[in-house]
Image: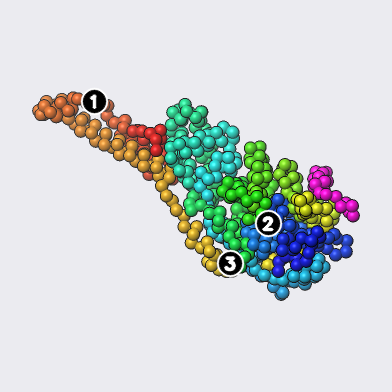
Amino acid sequence: MYFHKKICSGGTPVSETIFIGGGGEGYGVPQELLLKYANRHGLIAGATGTGKTVTLQILAESFSAQGVPVFLSDVKGDLSGLAASGTADFKLHEAFTSRAETIGFSDYSYDAFPVTFWDLFGEAGHPVRTTVAEMGPLLLSRLLELTEAQEGVLNIAFRVSDEQGLPLLDLKDLQALLVWLGQNSGEVSLRYGNISKASIGAIQRRLLVIENQGGAKFFGEPALDLADIMAVEPDGRGRINILAADKLMGAPRLYATALLWLLSELFEELPEVGDPDKPKLVFFFDEAHLLFDDAPKALVDKVEQVARLIRSKGVGVYFITQNPDDIPEDILGQLGNRVQHALRAFTARDRKALRQAAETYRENPRFSTEDAIREVGVGEAVTSMLIKKGMPGVVERTLIRPPSSQLGPLDAGARKAILAASPMSGKYDVAVDRASAFEMLGKRAEAAAKAAEEAEAKEEDLSATLQEYSAGRRYSGARVGRSTARPQRKAPSIGAEIGKVVLKELKGTTGRRIVRGILGGLFKGR
């Protein structure tokens, strides 16, 4: 119902294809995406207002109908309409049906699709969480915009966490461990390299910024189970996972890092499947330029590696951005299925980018690709899909098919009802805070503080005894012997003062500052 029920050129049954669009007079042959090449990744590009969001919507619909789960981010808040059917009383109904007739989409009809809503902040969807340890120092350094020296300190923190059995689950775990490193920088530096308190302070300030942006909700447990975004409904349709990103876009670095983390988790956890008949999951990365803006080479190399190898895990990745120039060349070359909406060329730089974009397509002798990219209207695109043996097809001008689901966002009541009926309801809604680095370091400090108090009490007894002895009072020989057997200390007690500091730190308003205990440290072992 949601794919073209004809035989495409070359005799491939349409059950193995997704219909993208076609054309009338002046347009090329119908464009269809071969499912067995859908994991070869893709690109949706074009200036603002040219139709990228609708193209994303129709691709999500089509993959779902073919039994392929989808993960996408809803940057504008428009894509929640995938959960509701389009209607004949919609103002664009006539335009949609006319477009379907023009491009030969005879099976066009309205329908809703199975949707799960997610939200890093846990407000407009089920919470998405990961642990600090799962994100790792590379992505976390990117999120915090750390210098090389600061990233080195963060790597040391992760190493100490692993070796000493101090789990880093949420931000307070990392903050506590960094405080400990600062208090013990001399000892730790001898083993791992220099740790400056200035670097630790800079990292702590960056963590505070992320916390103020609401990012603390992203770190913790229960962490997201990848199986929950790869579900297929009993009727055979793939579930569409929609990440609410309209508010998240206020913290663009958090947005990009969260999506890259999820992509990396898929790469690390999924088994090899070779060349499947269709993807196990399709991942749409909207506003992809945010991933690469000022990204260090190590991170770009990581993304390139993931893009190159994750297709063997059955995952197709589709980058969505305004200009193909936003994507590094080595990654752009791996994006075989392309839908290019109009690009504007008002400046010399724009014209250069337009020319470069045109050069990445297999030429069509019927028209100039550069002119076509400049001239296509809203809902039209210049397209190229992989064909036999994974070769890029000839570029074509294409009218994109209309969506079957609702165009525009759901109302608040409908969204709330879908969340309540979701199979994920209750699984992630309540955060779990089990014992980890923060609590473990806290217990050590409490034990040290208790030992300090006991030492202070004994010292006070000793001081009283010595005062009585000096006053000429008589004591039993056993007690005098015990008293004189221990060295005299100055009062007030240094141990008592340290104990007071420990207790003060533990009871501070932030509840997140840990100092080193006087009776031992991290290197006592697990």
Q: Quadrant of residue 470?
A: top left
Q: Position of residue 324 (x, y in %)?
A: 75, 48
- For marks 1 and 3, give the one nearer the viewer: 3
Instruction: Name the residue nearer the viewer: 362 or 149.
Output: 362
- For marks 1 and 2, give the one nearer the viewer: 2
* Side (left or right) of 381 relative to 503: right
Q: Position of residue 486 (x, y in %)?
A: 22, 26
* Side (left or right) of 510 relative to 424: left
Residue 277 badge: 2
- Give the mark nearer the N terminus: 1 vs 3: 3
Q: Which residues are magenta?
A: 345-368
* Amino acid identity at mark 2: Asp
Give me the C-alpha separation between circle 1 and circle 2.
81 Å
* Residue 344 belongs to magenta span: no
Q: Quadrant of the C terminus?
A: top left
Give me the C-alpha separation between circle 3 and circle 2.
20 Å
Residue 95 badge: none
- Give the mark nearer the N terminus: 1 vs 2: 2
Give me the C-alpha separation between circle 1 and circle 3.
78 Å
- For marks 3 and 2, give the one nearer the viewer: 2
- At 11% from the left and 27% from the top, the residue drawn is 477
Q: Badge 1 is on which residue?
A: 488
Instruction: Name the residue nearer the viewer: 292 or 183.
Output: 292
- At 71% from the left and 75% from the top, the residue drawn is 89
Q: Badge 3 is on which residue?
A: 234
